[in-house]
Structure formats: structure tokens, C-alpha cells
Amino acid sequence: MIPDVCRFMNRKRVGVHSLAAVLLLVSCAAAPSGHAAVVNAVAALVNDEIITLHEINREAQSVIREAEKKERLDDAGRSQIKRQVLDRLVEKRLVDQKVRELNIRVSEEEIRQAIEDVKKQNNMASQEILVAALAGQGLSFEQYRSQLREQIEKLKLVSQEVRSKIQVGESEVREFYDANPLKYTEDETFRARHIYFRTSEKSPADEIKRTMTTALMVLAEAKGGRNFAELARAYSEDPAARKDGGDLGVFRKGDMLPELERAVMAMKPGDVSELVYTSSGFHIVRLEERIAGKLKPFEQVKGEVEELLYRKKSEERFSQWAKELKSRASIEIKELSGLL
């Protein structure tokens, strides 16, 4: 029978090394040729708390699955992932211990609010949608709640131990802003008109041919210098064109259909495109104006820059804090040759 790990851990912290021996579990029946196959073992001791091989394998499963979507992993690749998972579990144990030491608590209301925030950010109208999305990732709602609790505990710990000791001065914010103008420049915008000819891949061949012939005739007139807005009013099958002369308004990269965007990006103001085919038909585009993005005023982005620098410093400080925590801890990594 597999020993109850929790029962052992709830006792006074004595005999941990004998516990490590007890938890080296073997299954002889399932192994060929009478050799014992290790199904669990103590992989590490962190201030006398154990990390088992079973924990590492469980946590590594999803990481290995994702990695194998990109390339096939050999034994060395899987072993490297398991070692990385072990490092993360060691850090997690240290953080959990510090959370208990500082008596950091997370209320049910904080968890409820965090769940509501997640639903809002992901446009989830109901709890059922969230539960279904979690199931798709192999998580139960209770597992997710547990993960959220741990994340909030860590955030509180970081705030208490790390963030409270960090300051970002206005001179730093200004320096970063001045050094990264592209990051704080508005996107380039475009203003264009189009003439639209309706057709589709399902249309009869002779109909597509007639539409294309008309479109090419209009294209020739447009390239010949005829007023584009008048051509749009006369020929475009976009209902609004009769009023606005095919005006598409002002838009940014990413706002248009990819086919139209590729055409526009290669044009200068006054240029008329070749015929552009999309799933809905043929288009002729005239670029009216390209408007260069302006640098956002410092005061407008000051808070954003400050938060970015604050977060960067927090991550660096937390990494240093975790190293210091690890250096003061008693950590023993077991030699599990062939298992990790």
C-alpha cells in the first residue's frame, strides 16, 4: 500500500530521511524479468519538506506535451524539462513556506473577485463557459481555484517582500520614454477609397468573367486619371458608395481585410491599386492619405511607463530575492539516475 504522505508530513519533522527511504516505492509485478520499476521516489528535500518524483512527472506532462507539438523530444530533452520543473517546484516550496511564515492569507472574496476579473477579461458571460474552458485545458474548477489562491498568495508575498522596497523615479521614467520613441508613437493611419464588384468563388464562371471585365474597364479609367469618387458612385456595388464615393474612412494596420491591407501598405498617396480579389469580390483601392503616427505626450503615457519599469524591477528583485531565499534554505536534490 502506498504510504499516506500527508500523514507523515503532519508529524513532528523527525525521521525525514527514513521517510525518503519509505517513499522509494517499487512495483515488481508490472516490471519484466523480475526487475523493480520505480513509480515514486523522493526527488528533493526543501527545508525537510519533500518533492516527489510523482509530482515532477505530473507537472512535466503538460510541458512535454506542448514541447512535442513543436518537435519530437528524445530522452535527454524530456529529462531537461523534468529538471526545469524540479527547479520550479523547489522555488514553489520555498515561496509556500515563506507565505506560511508570514501568515499571508487569501480570502474567499479575493478569489471570487479574481475569477470575476478572469471572466470579464475573456468575455465569458457565465460560470459554465469558464468551467468548460478549464475542462478543455484538463483543469477542474477546484484545481483552478487552488491555482488562483497560490497566485494571489505569491502576489501578496511579492508586494510585501519585494515591491514595497522598489521605487521608480520620474527621471527614470522620462529617460525610458526618450529612449523608446517608437514604443510610444501612435500607429500610422491611412485614408482610402474603394470600388467594389460583388462576386464569389461559388458564382458561375461566366458571371465572374463579366464582373472581372467590368472591373478591368473601370480600373483602366481610374488609372487614366478619372475622378475616383465619381467612378465609385457609378460602378461600386457597395451601397454606401453612392453617397460617400467609396470612402473607407481612416484606419490602422490590422483594421482591413488582409488582401486589401497588403495592397494599401505598398501604395503612396494618389496611387490606384491593381484589382484586389477577396472572398467577397473584386476591389479597386485608391490611397488618399498616409498619416504618420505622432509621439504620444509624456504625460499621457507616464503611468504606463512607470508601471512597466516597476514590473521589470519587481521581476528582477524577485529573482534576486528567490536566490537569496534558496541560498539560506536547506535543499537536498536526490540522485535519481535514469528517472529524471
Image: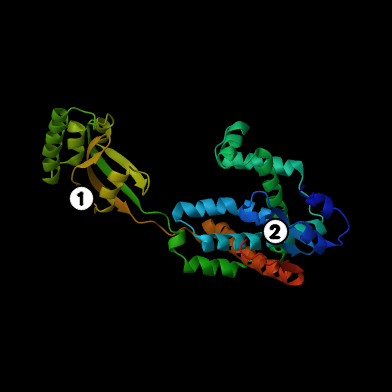
What is the x, y in percent for residue 21?
77, 61
* Along the viewing direction, whichever of 176 and 37 lies nearer the viewer: 37
**Helix, strand or loop status at disc 2:** helix
Q: Is residue 152 left or right of residue 132?
A: right
Residue 103 or residue 328, whichever sits in front: 328
- For the C terminus, which image quadrant? bottom right
Q: Which residue is mark 2?
A: 92
Q: Amino acid at mark 1?
A: Asp
The span from disc 2 to disc 1 (Cα, nearest Å) is 59 Å
Q: Residues within 10 Å of mark 2 (few under 14, many from 20)?
A: some
Q: Nearer the viewer, residue 153 or 276?
A: 153
**Hey, what amino acid is under mark 2?**
Lys
Closer to us: 44 or 39: 39
Q: Position of residue 148 (x, y in %)?
A: 68, 47
Q: Which element carries disc 1, helix, strand or loop?
A: loop
Viewed as shown, does residue 239 lie left or right of 48? Answer: left
| Badge 1: residue crowd in 10 Å (few <14, some 14–19, many ≥20) | some
Considering every residue shown, the one lying at the far right of the view is: 12
Residue 313, given in percent of the width and then of the height, sits at 62, 66
**Sequence order check, earlier mark of 2 and 1:** 2
**Residue tagged by mark 1?**
271
